[in-house]
Image (tube, rainbow, N blue to C red):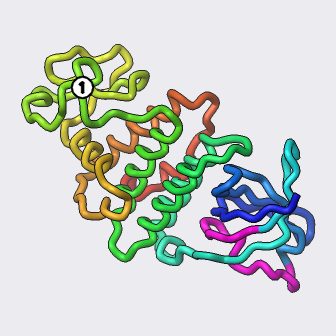
Amino acid sequence: MIVKTEAIILRSMKYGETSRILTLYTRDFGRMSVIVKGARGEKNKFGASLDLMSRSAVVMYRKEHRELQLMTQADLLRQYRGIIDAPDRLMYGFAILEFLSATVHGEEAHEELYDILLQALEALDAERVRPVNVLLHYLLRLSEALGIGVDTQHCMRCRASFDHEDTLRGGTSFSLSDGGFPCTDCAPAADSLVCAVETLRALSWLDRHEAARVHTLALSSHASQEGLNLLHRHIVTHVPDMRAIRSLPMLDIFS
């Protein structure tokens, strides 16, 4: 069956003398693996539409239960030059793609996952950007879409609102199994990681705002690193056999 959809290129590898095998995340079919014949060499008609992070309109022959679909056409909709041409943003872009590839498997439509990926790339590509804010925001949204959301607004035990300053006067921690934080008056979980109040406040702010606005929050190096570590550990805890995110150690906040 011939199908058309919108896709973002997650991975690309050479195959044979002239072909490529791509991993896509599509709006209508979720994650897909495709082969593109004639994608390399002098007669390549695809151009930048097959480059990593490119957003393209694609046409393919799709057959259910076949692992590798055949793509016949791709038209570039958007190339994120603000990411590709900036080394400090590029690794964050790779991390976003890696997290999606590592947590989502098989062809299954999930339009929310496509939209939050698109929003993250748009935010990372913007003229004014704090790349780590975009990644933290994306991981919060990714966790929520996967059904393992992190509650940054209330105590995980008594449900007290963190809007009240006295709920966190003695610090807090993060429970990997519960995906939440206790207030000052409630006991931490056995699997908790120590967390600075500053980090929780930052995650809470990011959680309440859209991707396009996250650049307005100034984060300390400690809050950035701790927040990223907490969300990474949380996702690893809840996604079985998740492979390592190789781009994480190369982010500038760890240099």
Q: For this rendering, which residue is in front, 113 or 87?
A: 113
Q: Residue furthest right?
A: 17
Q: Is residue 240 left or right of residue 211?
A: right
Q: Is residue 153 magenta?
A: no
Image coordinates of residue 107 in percent, x first then y, are 73, 45
| 54 with respect to 117 (left or right) | right
- Mark 1 is surrounded, within 10 Å at the Cα level, by few (under 14), some (14 to 19) or many (20 or more) other residues, namely many
Quadrant for residue 174, please give it: top left
Q: Is residue 56 above or below residue 180?
A: below
Image: 209 above or below 50: above
Q: Position of residue 30 (x, y in %)?
A: 67, 50
Q: Nearer the viewer, residue 223 or 31?
A: 31
**Region of the chain picked out in magenta, as a range:** 41-58
Residue 51 is one of the magenta-drawn residues: yes
Q: Three-letter amino acid code at disc 1? A: Cys
- Is residue 93 rendered to the left or right of residue 110? left
Query: In the picture, which quadrant includes the C terminus?
Result: bottom left
Give percent across and percent down for residue 185. 14, 17
Q: Which residue is mark 1?
A: 155
Could you say which is closer to the camera, residue 248 or residue 131? 131
Tell me the SS state at disc 1. loop
Q: Residue at 77%, 78% (x, y): give it.
A: 46
The quadrant the N terminus occupies is bottom right
Q: Residue at x 56, y 45 (%)?
A: 245
Query: At x 44% / y 46%, what residue is drawn?
Result: 141
178 versus 41 height, above or below:
above
Quarter of the figure with residue 4? bottom right
